[in-house]
Image: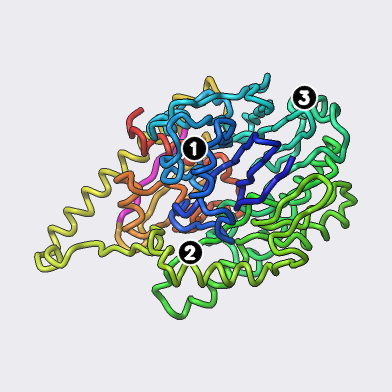
Amino acid sequence: MIVKAVNHASVLIQEDDNFILTDPWYEQPAFGSWLPVPPTSIHPVYLLALAKDNPKFKILISHGHDDHLDDEWLSLFPKDVTIIIPEYKSKGFLSRLKKLGLTNINEASNDGLQSDIFKIKSYVNSDISMDDAILTIETPNNFVVHANDNWQELEGDSLKTLQTDANKFKSENILYMSQCNLADGFPNIYRNYTQSEIDEIHNRRVDNIIVNSLKNADRINAKHFLNYAGYTASFKNVWNEDLIEDYKRFRDRVSFKSNDYVKKLSFENSCKAEVLDMVPGDSFDFTKVNKQFIGINLSTKSLKQESYKYYEKYDRVLRCDSYKKQDVFSSAELEVDDFSIKDKIEFVSEDLNYFLDNFKKFVESRLDYTSFQEDIVGCKVVFSATDFSVSEEIVIGEKCDGRKAEFFMGYDLLINILNKKSNWENLYIGYGGEVETTPKDINIGSVVRWLAMYGYYYQRSGNV
C-alpha cells in the first residue's frame, strides 16, 4: 500500500490497481474564507482521468464540510464513480451528493462495507457530533484510520471494535491519520478575551488536539501517525490597513503545525506512534516516506508564505466570501429619506426573527429523541449586526438561566446567511464574525453544534 498526501484531509491510497481518494477538496472556498495551504499536490485533472479509466477508483468522504467535500470538483467525476460515506441517521449529506448527479453512493456502517479489496467501517460519536465520523480502511495487508476531525479520546464500544480490527495487523502495518489543528472560532473570535489570553487558550487547545490524536494512535497500537486535516489558512481582505499585520499573524497562527512540533509533543507525552515527516506531495509505503523532491524537506514557513502569495497573485482569494464586500444599501436607496432605510432594516429584522425562531423549533423538536447537547436548554442566543441596528434573540427552552451567547457579524454576512448564500459556519469557523458570552468563561459548545446542524438544514429548506 502507498499513501500519498494530497492536501488537508485528502490522501490517495493505492494498493495495486485499487485506489481510494479521501475527502476531496481543490479550490472551492470553505466557510467563506478557507483555502488549502499548501495547495493540492495532485492537479484534479489527473485524478479525474484516473477515476474515468479505472473502475477500482473510489472516493471516501467523511462528512459534509466544504473542506472535506468540494461540490465543484466532485461534479466533474464520472457519475457512476464509487462514493463511500458513513451511514448517518440524517440523510442531508447523502442528499447533497445525489444532487450532484452521483449515482453510486454507498453507506458504510460500524459493521463494515466491502468494496473490492477495501473494507470500510465508520464510527460516529453521537455525544460530540451526529454528522461526523472516523472511518477505517482495511485491506489484506494494512489498516488505516481516517480520523479527519475526530481527535477526541477513543472510548467505549468504538475503541473496542477498532482495537479488535487493528489487532489483526502488525503494528508496522497500521497508520493513524488525525487532525492536528484547531478548526473553530474559539477563542480567536471571542470578544471576552485579551490577545494574550487568546494566544494562551489557542495554543493549549491545539496541543490538546494533537496529544489526544497521538494517544488514539497508541490505543490501537499504530506504529505510524500522519499529521493532516489542518493544512488550511483563512483568507480575509483587510479593509483597514492598520489591521493587516494583525491579520497576517492570525492567518499563520490558525494554519497548520509543523511535524517537528507534533514530534515534540509526542516526545513530551511519551507517545509511541512515529510521526511521519510528510507534507502534501509526499508519500508513504509503510517502510519509508518518499519525499516529493528526493532528499528535500520543505519548510513550514515557506509552504505557508508561498501559498499565500500564489492565491493572491492568481486571484484565487477573490472567490472567498470574505473578499466580496458588499454595499449595505445601493446608491439609489441612499438618495431617499431615512424612512426607506429603516423600512429595509425592519424587513431584515423580520427575516432574522424567522431564522432564530426556526432554530429554536429545530432544537426543541429534536432534543427529546436525540438527547444531543442538552446543555443548550436555558441559553439565550443573540444575533447582532455590528454596523446597523439589527439584533434579535431567542431562548432555548422556557426561560433563560443567565447564560447568553451573542454572535456579531457585518450586515452583509447577516444578509447572506438569511438569504442562504452563506452558511452560519462562515461566521464561526470561517472567522467572519465575533462572539461574546455571558458569563465570560461559559462553554457554548452545545449552541455552536446545534447552530452548525441548523445552518446546513436552513440552507436546504429553512422550514421545520
Q: Earlier in the sequence, mark 3 or mark 1?
A: 1
Q: Main secondary structure of the magenta part?
A: strand
Tally the marks.
3
Q: Residues within 10 Å of mark 3 (few under 14, many from 20)?
A: some
Q: Say which residue label 3 marks.
A: 161
Whole-percent x, y for residue 185 in the image: 55, 54
The CA span between labels 3 and 2 is 40 Å
What's the magenta region?
390-397
Secondary structure beneath dot 2 equals: loop
Quote the CA–CA distance across marks 3 and 1: 35 Å
> In the rendered structure, which disc, 2 or 1, sits on the residue that comes first in sequence?
1
Q: Does the magenta stretch include residue 437?
A: no
**Relative to 121, residue 244 above or below:** below
Q: What's the amino acid at mark 3? A: Thr
**Residue bearing mark 1:** 52
**Looking at numbered disc 1 in the image, what kind of residue is underneath it?**
Lys
For residue 116, which numbered disc appears in the image? none
Point out the frontmost of discs 2 and 1.
1
- The residue wearing badge 2 is 235
